[in-house]
């Protein structure tokens, strides 16, 4: 082998080593970037799925998932909860105290119905979806046990009351918007009557208080 050939061989060997090194380095970097990207995706998915303040489902996530549940099974009960006089709490104790109250109220709903069945509509309004045939006695028991309708808030020492409107889904053809509209009307009736929960009934187009 001549001197020139030896030099070329050495250069090729060095190039091969460098190529292998760069390949390994790039492979490692790609794996690191992929893991970072996957972690970021998970963070974004969590932010889109769960409400930042309360940890329950966001409005969008709740609507999408309940809509899919109705389309598949068609049977369930939508509940809308609203805290009475929440603005007064904010005005008296400040918005930070108001946010803390929202978190405590949400925790009561989550304990009663489960995190994946509870969503924050916005402000001091929440939604709950109970799958399957409506068991009004069981729902009433859950509401009573959780104390969301009336309780003394330990931090502010204020008596907190709320109301609930409910509507029933009986068919896969039911649209979430229709279910929500009926529950919202029942919620309005509950506010007027002072009932713990008001069910909207399709049969007679009236509300039933319990």
Image (cartoon, rainbow, N blue to C red):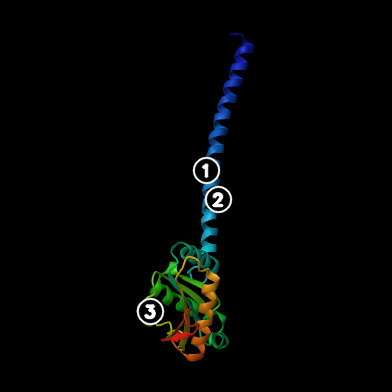
Q: Is residue 95 above or below residue 40?
A: below
How far from the left and from the top, in percent, is residue 202? 48, 78
Mark 2, residue position: 37
Check the image and report above or below for 88 versus 27.
below
Q: What element carries label 2?
A: helix
Q: Choose mark 3 or mark 2, whichever is in front.
A: 3
Q: Say which residue label 3 marks.
A: 136
Residue at the image position 62 percent from the left and 16 percent from the top: 8
Count neighbours of disc 1 (C-alpha within 10 A) and say few if under 14, some if 14 to 19, many if 20 or more. few
Residue located at (53% from left, 82% from top): 185
- Sort mark 3 into few (<14), some (14-19) or many (20+) by Cα contacts within 10 Å: few
Residues 40 and 199: in front is 199
Relative horizontal placement of residue 135, taking residue 45 as reference (left or right): left
Q: Is residue 119 visible?
A: yes
Q: Identify the mark nearer the N-term, 3 or 1.
A: 1
Which element type, helix, strand or loop, lies under badge 1? Answer: helix
Residue under label 1, please give it: 31
């Amino acid at each position: 082998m001549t001197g020139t050939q030896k030099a070329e061989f050495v250069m090729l060997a060095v190039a091969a080593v460098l190529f292998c090194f760069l390949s390994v380095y790039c492979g490692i970097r790609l794996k690191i970037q992929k893991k970072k990207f996957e972690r970021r995706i998970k963070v974004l998915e969590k932010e889109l799925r769960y409400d930042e303040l309360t940890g329950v489902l966001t409005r969008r996530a709740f609507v999408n998932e309940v809509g899919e549940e109705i389309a598949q099974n068609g049977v369930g009960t939508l509940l809308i909860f609203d805290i009475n006089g929440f603005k007064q709490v904010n005005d008296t104790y400040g918005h930070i105290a108001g946010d803390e109250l929202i978190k405590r109220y949400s925790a009561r709903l989550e304990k009663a119905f489960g995190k994946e069945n509870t969503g924050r509509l916005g402000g001091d309004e929440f939604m709950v979806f109970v799958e399957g045939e409506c068991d009004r006695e069981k729902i009433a028991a859950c509401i009573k046990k959780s104390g969301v309708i009336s309780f003394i808030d330990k931090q502010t020492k204020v008596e907190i009351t709320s109301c609930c409107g409910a509507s029933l889904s009986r068919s896969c053809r039911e649209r979430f918007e229709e279910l929500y509209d009926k529950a919202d009307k029942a919620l309005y009736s509950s506010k007027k009557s002072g009932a713990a929960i008001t069910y909207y009934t399709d049969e007679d187009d009236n509300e039933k208080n319990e």
